[in-house]
Image (spheres, coloured by chain):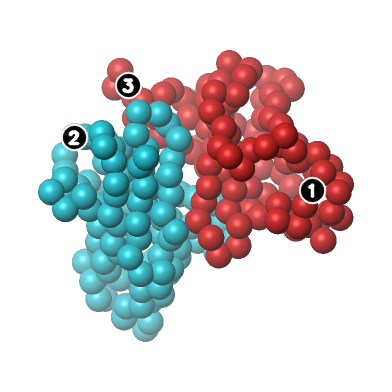
Chain colours: A cyan, B red
Amino acid sequence: AQSVTQLGSHVSVSEGALVLLRCNYSSSVPPYLFWYVQYPNQGLQLLLKYTSAATLVKGINGFEAEFKKSETSFHLTKPSAHMSDAAEYFCAVSVLTDKLIFGTGTRLQVFP
Amino acid sequence: EPEVTQTPSHQVTQMGQEVILRCVPISNHLYFYWYRQILGQKVEFLVSFYNNEISEKSEIFDDQFSVERPDGSNFTLKIRSTKLEDSAMYFCASSEALRGGGNTGELFFGEGSRLTVL
């Protein structure tokens, strides 16, 4: 069965620093991979998605992620953190169907 | 921009009571989903719905849960007799099409309905 593992339930960075949120997936067939962001008291917003096209995927708000099959990873990065990036980030996988399997989430804190 | 809307945003109920959570999916979408997120835990799939029937459901979605599309716009989740452990944020999502044929099957989520069972 497919799954995702997000390493680090909390990540703290300074404003302007690199953001790196880790996600590893497990799937026996080519997956679709997603990153969602959840701001406080809000729903889930799609940041970006990998759907077997380009391995480097660019999303909204300056985020990007790279699909690495050899490492079974889909880490989320942003070169320079902004205070407004503080939120919960979820990695998710879908295989064959549209059902999403979510990771446990990573809370990003950004300090001035 | 079209969006998925959910009501109520927060509901408090007594254990054993019935609860109905309502969702209005994006108008041209055909596939509907419910997920839930217990506080501090990950988002979990509950059920998917297409063509007026359940297409897939998780182990969580037991006989206490049911879904319905009573008219052309609403999609509801009913919990017949709520338990303390049903306290969670419930997310509705919809998609226009399934994966394949050039479609990515992207899900659009609502802002959630927080259910508190006392």
Image coords of residue B36 (percent x, y): 59, 48
The residue where tag 3 is placed is: B100
Foreground tag (1 vs 2): 1
- Residue type for callout 2: Ala
Rate crowding at label 2 as few (under 14), some (14 to 19) or many (20 or more) other CA atoms within 10 Å: few
Q: Is residue B102 left or right of residue B77?
A: left
- Residue type for callout 1: Thr
Image coords of residue B88 (percent x, y): 66, 55
Closer-to-camera residue (B6/A28): A28
Q: Tag 2's secondary structure?
A: loop
Mark 3–mark 2 distance (CA, rounded to whole Å)? 13 Å
Q: Are marks 3 and 2 in contact (CB under 8 Å)?
A: no
Q: Is residue B7 left or right of residue A2?
A: right
User: Considering the image in quadrants, where does the C terminus of chain A appear?
Assistant: bottom left
The residue sitting at 57% across, 43% down in the picture is B35
Q: Tag 3's secondary structure?
A: loop
Both marks 3 and 2 on one chain? no
**Residue extending furthest toward the left:** A70
